[in-house]
Amino acid sequence: MGVKGLFGNERYADFTMQCETRKWKVHKAIICPQSEEGATQCFTFMETTPDVVNAMLTYFYTHDYYDTKVEVLLNARVYGLAEQYLCEPLKDLACKKLASHLDAEWGNAQLVLAVETVYNTEPKGESRLRDCVLAVVRQHIDQLLRDPAMYPDFHATARETPSFLVDVLIGRYSLQTEADAKAPGVARIRCYQRNHHLCAKMNPVPLMLSKSATKQNVLLRCPTGLEGTFDQWKQYL
């Protein structure tokens, strides 16, 4: 019998895990090595649901889980549980499943549910789950914004969640700037600002005429936004 066949099989099981009224007989040798918290945490799960716990335990035995029931909420909650128990591969899988589902369902309520879920329940700061949702939104943002009558829930959510809208716009600007920087036939320099992550990713970068430039004061800016005169920039050509 392989490892997959042991899930749900009480033979040789040496630990019980519980969520609400549901219990699972599991094997420490399989569970603990896959979660950095597994060896020390109490395995009575609180503030989650049995279907989410079952998905995580299924993953520990099979490296996959079944996600056809309300995919957005399940995958988001699996990601959260995997983050709590420090299981990076499961976080990756939850993001992959969520992205696949949203790619196919971006035009309906599932995308709005995903935005509301990650922005209202996820901790602030960097989040792969949030990045996953933003990637899908940015891919279809022109169509979503162009037709409010067809996507009223998306527009309502965008108005009610300013941080989401800001993230969309920042990412859209970065993508456009990166595309401009890769255009052929453009002279480039090496941006000298170490904290310019966008420039560091694209170096060497093109200089663009700043919007604040005048005939008397010609200012050039890098893709990240630092402005300077030609004399200030030319040493980096």
Image (cartoon, rainbow, N blue to C red):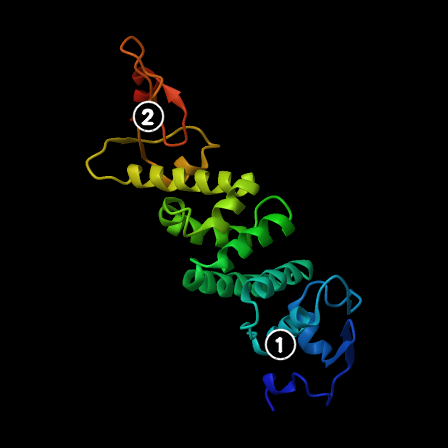
What residue sits 62% from the left and 44% below the top? 124
Name which quarter of the figure residue 113 lies in. bottom right
Q: Which disc is residue 236 wearing? A: 2
Residue type marked 1: Thr
Label 2 vs label 1, nearer the camera: 1
Taking the spot 73% from the left edge, 76% from the top edge, the residue there is 28
Between 7 and 19, the one nearer to me in the picture: 19
- Give above or below for 137 relative to 7: above
Res 205 → quadrant? top left
**Residue at image mark 1:** 58
What is the x, y in percent for residue 234? 30, 21
Where disc 1 sits, the SS reads helix
Quadrant where the N terminus sits is bottom right
Compare residues 163 and 124 and report the one nearer the observer.
Answer: 163
Residue 82 in sight here:
yes
Q: Circle 2 sits in a helix, a strand or a loop, which is it?
A: helix
